[in-house]
Image (tube, helix red, strand yellow):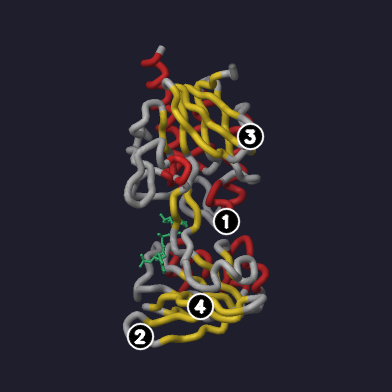
Amino acid sequence: MSEVYDLIILGAGPAGISAAIYAARAGLHTLWLDKQFSPGGQIISTYEVDNYPGMPGISGMDLGETMAAHAEKLGISTIRENVLSVEDTAGVKIVRTKKHEYRGRTLIIACGASHRKLGIPGEEELGGMGVSYCATCDGAFFKERTAAVVGGGNTAVEDAVFLARICRKVYVVHRRSELRADKVLQDRLREYDNVEMVWDSIPLEIRGSEQVTGLLVRNVKSGEERLLDTDGVFIAVGIVPNTEKFKNFVQIDENGYIIAGEEGLTNTPGVFAAGDIRTKSLRQVVTAVSDGANAVNSVQKYLLKKN
Ligand code: NAP
């Protein structure tokens, strides 16, 4: 029979990395799995993180790498494997990947969230041909060209600022007349006179054959349609939690998030949730790292009770 770990951590975003650091320091026999090549989860596609204490203006990629290097220094690093399924058999948590079956006494799910899709014609077909969900990854292809950003949250506005620095023209298409993004980001966006706000508008279709050539939008107040000439469409309309594999394992709310409070307790004993994947009101790096620490604290309490 394969060895049984004290703890298995799924995910290497800020919550998973923080959990790994706390688990290493607590001396827990831990297995840490992540499917991505680079550590950091969603922050690796963030141009600049300016609200994580002590790291003003750090790039998301650098912050992810710095955090993962901290964990490695404590002797813990990820194994790159994609989890296919999880189950609980008589209190033992079984995690299956393509190649292995791992067993743990406890499990922390810190698998984060992914980009929400618009679900409009052209989005799927022109993916990688002008349609992108990551301005910092793909923005450079649009140097001196035109780009449209869809969304009004922090990600959309950060993307628009990033693109405004390199593009000739940037449209920001938002379904309301007020941005959701933090004021500091909104102020930064206003500094660019090559940005045109397309208020009260929803995207209908992304046009193009081999490459994006336009974005058709409709004004929700006037009903008027407008075709924006653009070479790229950057979609930043929020996130959806990566809970597909856990639906029959732990309780999920109506929006797909794992129901868990600050201590990370799910309805399955010995299974904890941390970071963007759990129900919470503020999804930020700083709250994700806090979740990782809290979840390991809960793991330790659980293991003590079991001994
Ligand atoms: P978000 O805050 O949920 O914003 C999504 C935006 O997309 C909203 O403006 C929303 O409009 C719009 N939207 C949603 N569905 C849409 C649809 N089907 N069609 C058109 N527009 C749609 O998502 P986010 O910006 O990706 O941020 C996710 C989380 O990460 C947030 O908690 C955010 O604060 C955090 N984050 C923080 C930072 C930072 O602090 N530096 C940076 C990036 C992200 P409405 O406003 O009308 O709902």
Provide the residue designation for mark 4.
171
Sequence-first disc among 2 and 1: 1
What separation in Å lies between label 4 and label 3 (alpha carbons)?
41 Å
Mark 3 CB within 8 Å of ligand 1:
no
Residue corresponding to mark 1: 45
Residue under pointer 2 = 223
Asked if the residue under mark 3 is in contact with the one under mark 1, i.e. CB atoms within 8 Å, the reply is no
Residue 123 drawn at (x, y percent): 54, 69
Could you tell me which secondary element the residue under label 2 belongs to? loop
Nearest to viewer (mark 4 / mark 3): 3
The residue that label 3 is drawn on is 79
Q: Earlier in the sequence, mark 1 or mark 4?
A: 1
Separation (CA) of disc 4 from disc 2: 19 Å
Count neighbours of disc 3 (C-alpha within 10 A) and say few if under 14, some if 14 to 19, many if 20 or more.
Answer: some
Q: Residue at x 59, y 16 (%)?
A: 1
Among the 4 quarters of the image, the one containing residue 297: top left
